[in-house]
Amino acid sequence: MRDAGLPVVITTHNYHYGCPQVDLLHNERECCLDYDGGKRCEGCLTAPDPARARRNRSILQAFERTVGPELTVAMRNTVKLAKKRLTGSPARVPRPEDQVKPDPETARGFDTGGAEHPGTIDLGLEVVAKDKIDELGQAPADANEIFEQTSDVHLRVVNIYGERRRAGVEALNRASLVTPPSAFMCRAYEAMGVRPEQLRHVRLGQPHFDQIRRRARRSPYYDARPWDPATAKRPLRVAFWGTTRNNKGFGVMARAIERLDRETRQTCQFIIHAGGGDWGYRKRLSRFPEVSFLGGYDTVQLLAGAGEYDVAVLPHIWFENSPLVMLEHLHAGKFILSSRLGGPVDWICEPGSPEAAANGGLGNGLFHPGGDDETLAACIERVVRGEVVLPSPREIHAVSELWSYPQHVAEVQSIYRGLLGLDPDGASSGEDAAPEVVTTPSDRLMASR
């Protein structure tokens, strides 16, 4: 296309051009800080058949659009069961580890066991190898900086995977412009050899972000701080939204919950909205009555869900780009406990940091090293003890640099017009005019910083 004289803009949402796994996540368990010239890529993943994967995903998406994620999972399992029966496979007998056992405390009646009791429930469920709960790796707290400052290891080429990275970087350098949604991804691709003049950070805006933001601003609780241990008459509601895929790090949150002492845990209610196979995690956390699994979700549930929680957890173990779920939390005005990996460092600022000045030093989140469940548990404990003030949605918005969808469209349109030799500002009349940019008080506050 470039040889034909056509301008090309590439928006990267992952690391596909430099990593065949796409997430820079070795074995889908730990950050890949050094691919060893391509040697570390060997055996990293078992490649699926592309045609089959696309076909299956297309079918699932069609079902999800029609009946929603929960019924899709049920239908998928029903089809598998019917297929086994039709092919003569023996009926599946429930495994003992998957069956709820009689309550071993039946004889207690109403007796709670006193302060010495751990406050747990024994359902007799067990996690086994078939549940496929992987041990996830831990990244150093400065993993971002390590990756950005070690370009020498990213440019080594010793095999076909190294050649693939070199070809991907050359492709990006041939483009007219590369527009990652996070500044970190710009720096990461620059470390892999993309020329800095090729890169331009374009923040994401989405229509449903704006819906979430409007809901928060219309709420009578927009100026209310959500939870304070000194006055609280209900638990602190801590939520995870996402999937159970390793890269999203739910296993880190599960281990963090297991680390909490009884008092801290019982001061919380953990609300898990996670698509994908969650049965292993449900069994693992079944002894804690403070953990609720609500399954996958769709946009309708997402828009309504802001009233369900006070604090969000973002425990990813890969170099996230500009995660939609993070932006959804911030637009909803929520404080985030986040891994310090990838793009979230461009949005989340901790209490007392210079970047938190716009809301009086309260910030909008706390960081923990990726994969570090002990530090994540400590972050939860800090909030429970009141060492961290949870800001109101208005205060979260004041310190979060977020774009509306019209702002995003105007920026993208400006780029396209500029590359076509037109007025980047869209000053012409008619259909070519750029959409009006909608600003809010916090938008103007951020613009003045």
Image: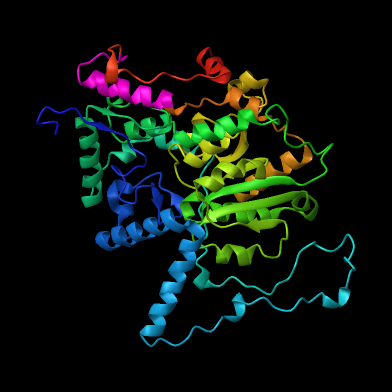
Q: Is residue 201 left or right of residue 323?
A: left
Q: Residue furthest front?
A: 430
Q: Position of residue 425 (x, y in %)?
A: 32, 14
Q: Is residue 403 left or right of residue 127?
A: left
Identified at 40% across, 59% down, the residue is 63
Q: Position of residue 154 (x, y in %)?
A: 32, 40
Asked if residue 417 lies in the magenta stretch, the reply is yes
* Dominant secondary structure of the residues highlighted in magenta in the image: helix
Identified at 44% across, 88% down, the residue is 90
Which residues fall within the magenta stretch?
406-426
Q: Position of residue 235 (x, y in %)?
A: 76, 47
Q: Position of residue 330 (x, y in %)?
A: 57, 33
Q: Is residue 273 above or below residue 364?
A: below
Q: Is residue 242 above or below residue 396?
A: below
Instruction: Mark yes or no: residue 72 visible.
Output: yes
Foreground: 144 or 397? 397
Q: In which quadrant is the N terminus drawn? A: top left
Q: Is residue 211 left or right of residue 231?
A: left
Q: Please tell me in which quadrant of the rendered image residue 197 appears.
A: top left
Instruction: Mark yes or no: residue 258 visible.
Output: no
Q: Is residue 414 above or below residue 126?
A: above
Indicate the colouring scheme.
Answer: rainbow
Asked if residue 285 lies in the magenta stretch, the reply is no
